[in-house]
Image (cartoon, rainbow, N blue to C red):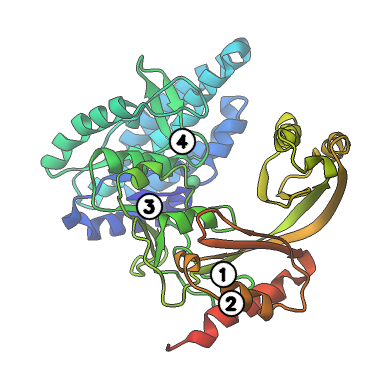
Amino acid sequence: MKFGGTSVADAAAFENVARIVANERAAVPIVIVSAMSGVTDSLLAATDIASLENVFDRHRAVAHELLDTSRAADFVENELRNAAIQLDALLQSIIQKPAEHKLLQDAVVSFGEILSSTLLAEVLKQKGIQARQIDARSCIITDDEFASAAPLMEETFAQSQSELIPVLESGVTPVLGGFIGSTKQGVTTTLGRGGSDYTAALIGAALSVSEIQIWTDVTGVLTADPRIVPEAQTVERLSFGEAAELAYFGAKVLHPKTIQPAIENSIPVRICNSRAPHELGTLVGPETETSPRTVKAIAHKTGVTTVQITSARMLGAYGFLRALFEVFDRHRTVVDVVTTSEVSVSLSLDDASALPAIVAELEELGTVRVEKGRAIICVVGEGLRGTPGIAARVFSTISDINVTLISQGASSINFTFAIEEERVKEAVTRLHEEFFATKKGT
Ligand code: ASP
Ligand code: MG
């Protein structure tokens, strides 16, 4: 059970987590927790210990509110005080040793998860749940790519098993901070932003759990963005492939990279809402079952720029696409959707900040056309692969809206296209109506 930062934002949130964990006790859970919301950002921005006063205050407040006097005093006087002493020293050495910046920075941010996991274990004990904080750094063993360390699977699996199995066997619930790890030599590392999901997937895979639960503040993945389609519903089941396609769009609930260990070990991942714990959320799993409605979700993204490069030189030539993509590579610009014809390539970008320089270089390859203010709409569903007529339905539903850059992914489970941003609301609403509302009861 992984709880994100908003699930441990304050005392009420901690208490809620304790209730949710208590309800699952029969299933023998392992708890993974992120730093309290905003703490990772504060630690990354900290220049001295004084700038962290608010971080300490928030932990102290939770301790005083939820723990009895001696437990709270113990947490504040030992855990918080030690953290402050170590952070003070670390922040000073960051200034003195700029060459070790990344290494020291990881040690600094690790305190977010060290403190939240220690505090959560205390809160669970206070509520009568046998729990113990386990230092995630003795389970997640990584390389030394600080700030985005990659786990060493063999070591991580072995360590996680030897650290956690005895705890579980003694009937105690282990509580680990997400996101943090250590090198084989014991130097603290972090897995990159949002890394707590990754920790959950790694621990889940190492212990062959029956389900990995990602507890967040939304009810799973929805059939469309609820700000545009208020009647959007929770998608009950998604395949790993469908979830990966949706991750790029607002449905940022699961990053495909972070659940890779779950995918490889066929462990289902459930996205649960800590504000509505009785709702089932969305179960993401290995099954590629097709929904009776075929389409599972309609996602979209605005603020997209599309670029079209046309060149007769491309016909029958090799190396053209390489030259083209090298331009984006040089400017470290992420390309999302790509479609090509014999003599043209169209693609979409989220971040167009390097565009003037990119266009100047692309013009050496062919004629370039840039369109700003576009939106990408993505229709996702395993059933798209073999169901005729979906594209016809999509396009006839929005037949008065100009569509560009049409792409059906290689996996054939998504159908993606660009339109003008101003019409996205209308298009998504109409598509949702076509594929969901009108189908009710069939
Ligand atoms: N606390 C880390 C972050 O904010 C990791 C996580 O929450 O998943 O990125
Ligand atoms: Mg997070």
Closer to the eye: label 1 or 4: 1
Q: Which residue is mark 3?
A: 14
What quarter of the picture does the C terminus occupy? bottom left
Residue under circle 4?
Answer: 112
First in sequence: mark 3 vs mark 4: 3
For residue 178, side relative to residue 57 (left or right):
left
Residue drawn at the location 41% of the way across and 52% of the way down: 11
Going by the numbered disc 3, the residue's amino acid type is: Phe
Give SS at disc 3.
Answer: helix
Which dot, 1 or 3, sits closer to the camera? Answer: 1
Q: Amino acid at mark 1?
A: Ala
Question: Along the polypeptide, which appears first: circle 1 or circle 3?
Answer: 3
**Which residue occupies 75% across, 65% down?**
419
Decide which of tag 2 and tag 3 comes sooner along the chain: 3
Residue receiving disc 1:
224
Can residue 270 be seen from the camera position used here? yes
Q: How many C-alpha atoms fall within 10 Å of the one at disc 2: few (<14), some, or many (≥20)?
A: many
Q: Amino acid at mark 2?
A: His
| Label 2 vs label 1, nearer the camera | 2
On whether ligand 1 comes within 8 Å of the CB at mark 4, the answer is yes
Q: Residue beneath label 2, please?
A: 432
Residue 18 in the image: above or below residue 139: below
Q: Residue 304, located in which quarter of the rendered image?
A: bottom right
Identity of the residue drawn at 38% across and 52% down: 14
- The span from disc 4 to disc 2 (Cα, nearest Å) is 40 Å
Q: Secondary structure at mark 2?
A: helix
Circles 2 and 1: CB atoms closer than 8 Å: yes
In the image, taking residue 167 as reference, residue 117 lies left or right, namely right
Mark 2 or 3, which is nearer the eye? 2
